[in-house]
Amino acid sequence: MTELKTAWKNIVAGALEAYARERGVEAGPDLVSAIVIERPPKAELGDLGFPMFPFAKLLRSAPAQVAAALASKIAADPAAGARGQARAEGPYLNVSLARPGICGATIAAATSPGWGSFGFLAGKKVMIEFSSPNTNKPLHLGHLRNNALGESISRILSAAGAEVRKVNHINDRGVHICKSMLAYQRYGEGRLPADEGLKSDHFVGKYYVMFNKLKEEDPRAEEAAQGLLRRWEAGESEVIELWKRMNGWAIEGIKATYERTDVCFDLYDFESDTYELGRAEVLKGLAAGVFYKEEDGSIWVDLEDAGLDKKVLLRKDGTSLYITQDIGTAIFRHGDWPYDRLIYVVANEQQYHFKVLFEVLKRLGFEWAAELHHLAYGLVNLPSGRMKTREGTVVDADDLMDEISALAAKEIEEKGREGAVGDMAGVAEKIALGALHYYLLQTGPMKDMLYDTEASLSFTGDTGPYIQYMGARASSILRKHEAGEGNAVKGRVRFELLCGDADWNLVKRIAEFPETLEASAKAMEPSLLAGYLHDLAVDFSAWYRDNPVLNNSDADLSASRVELVRAVRATLQAGTRLVCMPFLESM
Ligand code: ARG
């Protein structure tokens, strides 16, 4: 559709220029760049709509008059005629595309391998950092949003041809880690996660919460945690040993959650390996006069001329801060794998941090600093507001998945579908993941949102399970056909039969998949794709309700419609994968 839209834009531009000449008006580039394409509100009105309002003033004609003039010019152009027909409809110029070519090409493309991947980012290397948890507690609902965004954008950019490297930056050192270690030393008595029947990251998280108890019992607990950090930095073997053990538990548990939610990484980097890198870079910047030293020995950057503040980059005792390690890590990453773009998927409360980071890297003279991007996202909460409560009682990712999965299983039971779905637990889990990821991605990243478990699971409406259900319906039609049921087996596929209004609408929707994917990749917005999949599911649902596929008396039409179902299925399959929803053959 993209080429077709471009072609029609050019046709309209040509006609506009000709009309402008007639009116004695200079048709500058402004005139042509004001052309916009809309989707007419009703299918009967055509496939593309060009509003004429932007041209009225310059051409000193009413919009309807411009539309009529352009329509008659285009009607006289045989090259345009081969591509469709233009009609004036009040202030709009509406175009009905020439259908037969598009039907064949669209269905052929959609049913071939490689549908949904194309190359506008070919040759580009994109690094994307997401999730990046701390190792003192399990993942929570905020991470689920982060992971969904990071994983989905990675898949979308890969589909757009980029070479993508997914990186998880594990913040595995610092005083917060020492707190859980200290509480474990005090209360753990050498127990293992299995001894307490806990998933290993939940076990670590439990001790992190118990640090609060420790603080009540021992007013010097905070100091003790600082002391433990100094001993860690000095490499004391007993401390390192415990740190390794507890981090091992935390990471093992967190990885199980990734696996359950179908998220994975090409690379894990650990703050404990990279936190020293920044110090040398800050010292270099000081020598180069980009930074300055305060009397107490701390090193600063003054970003006031860039509308930011003065910011400390290295403490007076020479220890690093959060920003120090990020400076080092970004430089190291670019040296290791020279990226064209680095995207950080991190909550919007860190917006200031990333502004400072990018500005500092720019001032250090790294040209690639212009290609750094903070993909910020807003809060996600449950309607009950559970997420806001104090540490230890945030919405846990695993618990939430258990809850959604159990609700999905109940839904299958209530619908009496246990027999049809086969592996009940497996399917419930896939529906849960479809519900979760679709819900989280359907909203643009910057908006704060509430995660409504029940609403996300509804089998009707704008939800993941609804889209999954339509995928299963398409699969079921194809299964029946493959089993020899219906009339299609006797027919011959003739794409021109799909040019009637009912089929055409669906074909057109399928043809929009590549351009939606491209728009979604450019804007790094999975929500565009999510919205598209919903529209496709709605169109498909209405279409197969009203138009017999297998039981059509016209065998050729039946066979052709089977191909259309195949194209729908392929598009739903490719599209849902990009928004991290499992595809279901039956549900
Ligand atoms: N671990 C940090 C947190 O939970 C996020 C890290 C983001 N990435 C980075 N390179 N600073 O807040």
Image (cartoon, rainbow, N blue to C red):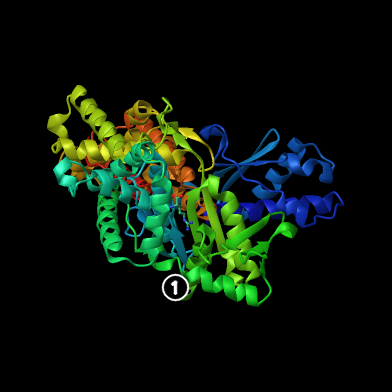
Please tell me which residue is depicted at 39% across the width and 51% down the height of the picture.
225
Please tell me which residue is depicted at 68% across the width and 44% down the height of the picture.
71
Which is more toward the observer, 140 or 464?
140
Which is more toward the observer, 93 or 269?
269
Q: Is residue 177 above or below residue 296?
A: above
Q: Residue furthest right?
A: 24
Please tell me which residue is depicted at 48% across the width and 73% down the height of the picture.
338
Residue 551 in which image quadrant: top left
Which is more toward the observer, 469 or 277?
277
According to the picture, the residue beneath numbered tag 1 turns out to be 337
Q: Is residue 463 above or below residue 32?
A: above
Give left or right: position of 238 versus 197. right
Give left or right: position of 336 versus 246. right
Residue 95 in which image quadrant: top right
Which amino acid type is shown beneath numbered disc 1? Trp
| Image location of residue 74, percent across then percent down | 66, 49
| Image location of residue 424, percent across then percent down | 16, 35
Give the secondary structure at mark 1: loop
| Image location of residue 376, percent across then percent down | 53, 48
Disc 1 Cβ-to-ligand 1 distance below 8 Å: no
> Total label count?
1
Q: Is residue 324 above or below residue 476?
A: below
Asked if residue 129 can be seen in this view, the reply is yes
> Image quadrant for the C terminus?
top left
| Image location of residue 64, percent across then percent down | 74, 36
Q: Residue furthest top?
A: 414
Badge 1, how many Cα within 10 Å: few under 14, some, many 20+? few
Asked if residue 76 can be seen in this view, the reply is no
Give left or right: position of 130 versus 425. right
Please tell me which residue is depicted at 72% across the width and 54% down the height of the picture.
307
